[in-house]
Amino acid sequence: EQTFAIDGDTISAVANKADLEALGIDTSNMEGSGKNVSVTVRYLLIDTPESKHPTKPAQPYAKEASNRNNELLHNGSVTIEFDKGPKVDKYGRLLAYVYSGDLFVQELLLEEGYARIAYVEAPNTTHLNRLQVAEATAKDQQLHIWSKPGYVTEKGFTD
């Protein structure tokens, strides 16, 4: 598969090298052959429970968030949208909004209670209001991560 979920808020995808370079993204450390490179994309403005921590077990709802992310990616062709701020994080991951067909993946993960809003750093906030509405829906209905009192905190998730 060319595009798949690494976890609930990160995916692996294949991108056109020239397109990335045209946006000022350094592709020299990215693996790939020919015109395409393999990229890791970290979703802007959301956080899901950790499923791939090197020393800790998966947090509650981490596997569900990862599985749901993977399902959403198979709705159609996956496209990414960069915001106005940094396009790459300190780990070399692209920072973007992700769409699968006509679905806004971050919005659905929030609306269904698999993610919380996090890492809000202007100017990468274009879709913040829309995403806050989606998060509020899940909170009101106490879906998944919101079903455990005290589980979601300002800094992440309690173990």
Image (cartoon, rainbow, N blue to C red):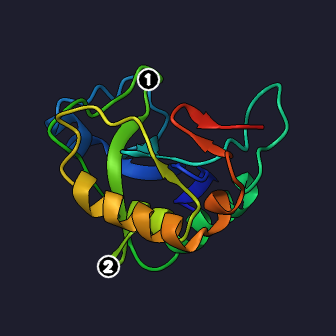
Residue 29 disc label: 1
In the shown orientation, is residue 25 left or right of residue 123? Answer: right
Question: What residue is drawn where x is 42% and y is 19%?
Answer: 90
Amino acid type, residue under disc 2 in the picture: Asp
Quarter of the figure that contains the C terminus: top right
Which residue has dot 2 on it? 102
- Please determine whether, in this image, residue 29 is positioned above or below residue 52: above
Q: Nearer the viewer, residue 25 or 151?
A: 151
> How dense is the environment of label 2, judged by Cα within 10 Å: few (below 14), some, or many (20 and up)?
few
Identify which residue is drawn at 38% across, 26% down: 89
Q: Residue 96 has which mark? A: none
Separation of marks 1 and 2 at Cα, in angstroms:
31 Å
Res. 90 visible in picture:
yes
Secondary structure at badge 2 equals loop
Q: Could you tell whether 9 is left or right of 79 in the image?
A: right
Q: Residues within 10 Å of mark 1 (few under 14, many from 20)?
A: few
Q: Position of residue 63 (x, y in %)?
A: 74, 57
Tell me what residue is drawn at x 33 percent, y 65 percent: 133
**Residue at 17% of width from left, 35% of height from top?**
123
Residue 99 x %, y %: 35, 66
Disc 1 element: loop
Indicate the quadrant containing the N terminus: top left, top right, bottom left or bottom right. Answer: bottom right
Q: Are marks 1 and 2 in contact (CB under 8 Å)?
A: no
Across and down, in percent, residue 21 comes to 21, 34
